[in-house]
Image (tube, coloured by chain):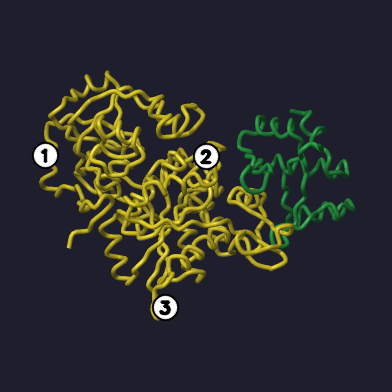
């Protein structure tokens, strides 16, 4: 039976057989791509970004910017672009109607069938997608860094990426993920979007969303799962290292705070745009493709600074809900109440004067001070694993440093053909 | 209206607590987050801006705690030492004059 993804389109992996690929790439111009583009090639080819089959042409970009829909009417919120300079277009001989090979790390990764070469006003794109054209917004900064020409066209992988340890068990593309859900017998799966090491506030966001998602389903056997889908992409100094993020999320299951029957950790390659409400809509499409039925959204989802209101993402999602095949699950903040002696929701507890709120930033600050937080705030197994990751992967630090950026093992590589 | 003050949370481990205790300053600690000890040193608006400018890794947690977080550990150690030296948590003006 066909697996239908976002927009009701069948999810199809665009990946060539190795024997065919070797022949197809012979004599084609080879263009090196940076990590953001390689991440998006994987997103397109495996169906994470279905119904996209390639990098967008101008009609789609314009429609996405102005109407938050592809030219065919399917809801889509963020342009997916491949940029080149005029000089590169001439140097590599990129021509409409012909194909080129995209290489990553010096090896062939994908064929791009060039359908269109175009320009687009970046300032106007920023205003439409991010609601601002300020260069200090990280999504705008990324847009302004694009070169001046965009190349649209279908993408096909010529070989699968090699996912390096410790990430490989967590790379579950849409078709594989859907099989996994069937094996587990889950009827509903709720997404937890993250790029953080979990504290108990996050743990309870997941637990709360699990309760909300379970709703009227029978409880005789486990029918609902939480999928942690960690976004792995560009890192900033001071972030937790990727290894710590993915392994500690899974540690919550391994240490029994969840179990195999209700929790699974996975990753998606994507460079966050911090587009707030529009990123929330993008996440809905992405997780629909992964086979999820529900998506948790907290306050200021995927936002940055003070660009978006706490619940702007919820409001935008409501405008397109009838066109989405995923149910939003809205979550209030969780906090520690010393009176209750437990983690509780701000929507439940009435000891406001005693509340002790905490955030990922505060927990990072505690860890950075070399202090082990109480287990009610940060699970000891998670803390110990963060420290282990610092030694094993982070050159002594659980946070991204210049040394980590320079020497880390890449999350994936493209092997030689 | 009283001027807004923004805390810098210096989280207290055994080593830091021993130093505070020795200086007779154990009472300066507060309990936060399920019993975790913290020394809260306050910055005013101008001091907050200067901290964020001088220490670019620092972040003002505007959404949840309204505190200044992620100062490097060696900077926090210096702030802590200044508190012990001056026997007060009102030291940010003095501390920042060196920067």
> Mark 1 — residue?
A24
Looking at the rendered structure, the secondary structure element under dot 3 is: loop
* Discs 2 and 1 lie in a common subunit: yes
For image coordinates 52% across by 57% down, the residue present is A331
For image coordinates 29% across by 68% down, the residue present is A182
For image coordinates 64% across by 40% down, the residue present is B60
Residue A14 drawn above or below residue B58? below
Q: At which x and y percent is residue A38?
A: 31, 40
The colour chain A appears in is yellow
Crowd class of label 1 (few under 14; some 14 to 19; many from 20; radius 10 Å): some
For image coordinates 53% across by 36% down, the residue present is A307
> Counting residues from the N terminus, which is met first, the one under dot 2 or under dot 3?
3
Crowd class of label 3 (few under 14; some 14 to 19; many from 20; radius 10 Å): few
* Discs 1 and 3 lie in a common subunit: yes
- Residue A187 occupies which quadrant of the picture? bottom left
Q: Are marks 1 and 3 in contact (CB under 8 Å)?
A: no
Residue A389 drawn above or below residue A94? below
């Amino acid at each position: 039976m066909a697996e239908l993804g976002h927009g009701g389109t069948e999810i199809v992996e665009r990946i060539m057989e190795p024997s065919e690929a070797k022949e197809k790439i012979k004599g084609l111009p080879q263009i090196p791509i940076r990590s953001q583009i390689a991440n998006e090639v994987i997103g397109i080819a495996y169906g994470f970004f279905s119904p996209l089959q390639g990098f967008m042409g101008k009609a789609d970009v314009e429609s996405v910017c102005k109407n938050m829909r592809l030219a065919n009417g399917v809801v889509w919120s963020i342009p997916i672009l491949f940029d080149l300079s005029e000089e590169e277009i001439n140097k590599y001989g990129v021509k409409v109607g012909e194909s080129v090979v995209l290489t990553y790390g010096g090896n062939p990764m994908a064929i791009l069938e060039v359908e269109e070469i175009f320009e687009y006003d970046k300032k106007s794109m920023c205003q439409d997608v991010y609601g601002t054209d300020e260069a200090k917004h990280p999504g705008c900064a990324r847009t302004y860094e694009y070169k001046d020409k965009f190349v649209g066209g279908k993408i096909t992988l010529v070989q699968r990426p090699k996912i390096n340890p410790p990430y490989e068990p967590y790379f579950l593309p849409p078709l594989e993920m859907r099989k996994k859900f069937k094996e587990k017998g889950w009827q509903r799966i709720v997404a937890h979007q993250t790029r953080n090491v979990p504290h108990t506030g996050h743990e309870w966001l997941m637990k709360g969303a699990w309760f909300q998602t379970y709703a009227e389903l029978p409880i005789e056997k486990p029918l609902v799962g939480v999928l942690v889908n960690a976004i792995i992409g560009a890192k900033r100094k001071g972030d937790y290292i990727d290894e710590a993020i993915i392994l500690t999320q899974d540690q919550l299951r391994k240490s029994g705070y969840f179990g195999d029957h209700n929790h699974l950790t996975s990753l998606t390659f994507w460079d966050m745009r911090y587009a707030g409400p529009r990123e929330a809509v993008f996440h809905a499409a992405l997780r629909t493709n992964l086979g999820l039925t529900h998506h948790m959204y907290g306050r200021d989802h995927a936002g940055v600074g003070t660009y978006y209101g706490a619940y702007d993402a919820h409001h935008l999602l409501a405008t397109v809900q009838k066109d989405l095949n995923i149910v939003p699950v809205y979550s209030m903040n969780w906090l520690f109440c010393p009176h209750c002696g437990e983690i509780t929701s701000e929507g439940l507890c009435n000891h406001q004067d005693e509340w002790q709120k905490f955030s990922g930033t505060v927990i990072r600050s505690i860890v950075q001070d070399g202090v082990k937080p109480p287990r009610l705030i940060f699970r000891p197994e998670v803390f110990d694993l963060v420290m282990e990751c610092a030694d094993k992967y982070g050159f002594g630090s659980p946070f991204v440093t210049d040394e980590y950026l320079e020497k880390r093992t890449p999350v994936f590589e493209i092997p030689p053909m | 209206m009283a001027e807004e003050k923004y805390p810098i949370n210096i989280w207290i481990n055994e080593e830091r607590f021993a130093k505070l205790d020795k200086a007779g300053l154990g009472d300066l600690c507060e309990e936060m987050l399920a019993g975790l000890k913290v020394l809260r040193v306050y910055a005013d608006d101008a001091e907050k801006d200067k901290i964020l400018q001088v220490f670019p890794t620092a972040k003002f947690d505007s959404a949840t705690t309204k505190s200044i977080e992620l100062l490097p550990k060696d900077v926090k150690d210096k702030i802590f030492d200044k508190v012990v030296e001056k026997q007060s948590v009102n030291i940010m003006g003095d501390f920042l004059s060196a920067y």
